[in-house]
Amino acid sequence: MFYCTDEPHGLPHNPFNALVTPRPIGWISSVDQDGNVNLAPYSFFNAVAYSPPQVMFATSGHHAEGGLKDSVRNVRETREFVVNLATWSLRDAMNTTSTTAPSDTDEFDVAGLEKEPSEMVAPPRVKASPAHLECRYTQSVELPCTSEDDTNLVVFGEVIGIHIRDDILVDGLVDMEKADVIGRLGYMDYVRVSDMFTMDRPSWPLNK
């Protein structure tokens, strides 16, 4: 089939995000200017630069109570956030934190997650997560949006500190099988990273 994205596609659900997969999950912890903690997963998330290391997460729409979603508002206010690695063992807790809770709700408590202090930023880390990226907010970019009542916003941050649990390091490399991470597919589907392979990058001229 083919369809123009500004016309009805006739399918039960929008297939767009089911085609851009798998996507890493940015499990973002943040605090507001009063110290209230927020934790929420974002599937529009990725690393975007090496030097300095930088990441982004994107959000659509607004908070149910009005205004920007808590993570975006908090990051803009305090200019800090943490990316926590989402894993198979933490899948239910991660999913719990996706709920649209009141702004003064601590999703760590709702999901039964223990906090761990960060080294360089105020937002706490998910203690059970095997890796964390401490980030300093750099900028946000507003993208085109078909609805005047909504917004599409991309938040960028520079990674200024990285935590890696020793047991997922093997010979100095991060072992993704030990990390047991999960990713986002389309609809309500996820993937568990358990089937990996290696390919060396070719050099020019190619050997045929």
Image (spheres, grey):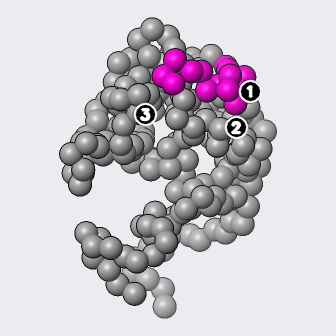
| Image: magenta residue range | 102-116
Q: Which residue is labeled 2 in the image?
A: 93
User: Percent x, y for residue 65?
Assistant: 41, 28
Q: Residue at x 50, y 44 (%)?
A: 42
Q: Along the polypeptide, which appears first: circle 2 or circle 3?
A: 3
Magenta residue check for 63 = no
Q: CA distance from mark 2 to mark 3?
A: 21 Å
Question: Disc 3 marks which residue?
Answer: 64
Q: Earlier in the sequence, mark 1 or mark 2?
A: 2
Q: The residue under label 2 is which amino acid type? A: Ala
Q: Secondary structure at mark 3?
A: loop
| Distance (Cα) linking label 1 and label 2 | 7 Å
Is residue 112 visible from the viewing direction of this image? yes
Q: Under tag 2, what secondary structure? A: helix
Q: Residue at x 23, y 54 (%)?
A: 146
Task: In this rendered view, identify the residue nearer to me: 127 or 6.
Answer: 6
Q: Say which of 149 and 141 sits in front.
A: 149
Element carrying mark 1? loop
> Measuring 51% from the left and 24% from the top, which residue is drawn there?
102
Residue 77, percent across and down? 35, 18
> What kind of secondary structure does the magenta stretch mostly adopt?
loop
Earlier sequence position, callout 3 versus callout 1? 3
Q: Position of residue 170 (x, y in %)?
A: 75, 47
Asked if marks 3 and 1 touch (Cβ < 8 Å), the reply is no
Quarter of the image containing the N terminus? bottom left
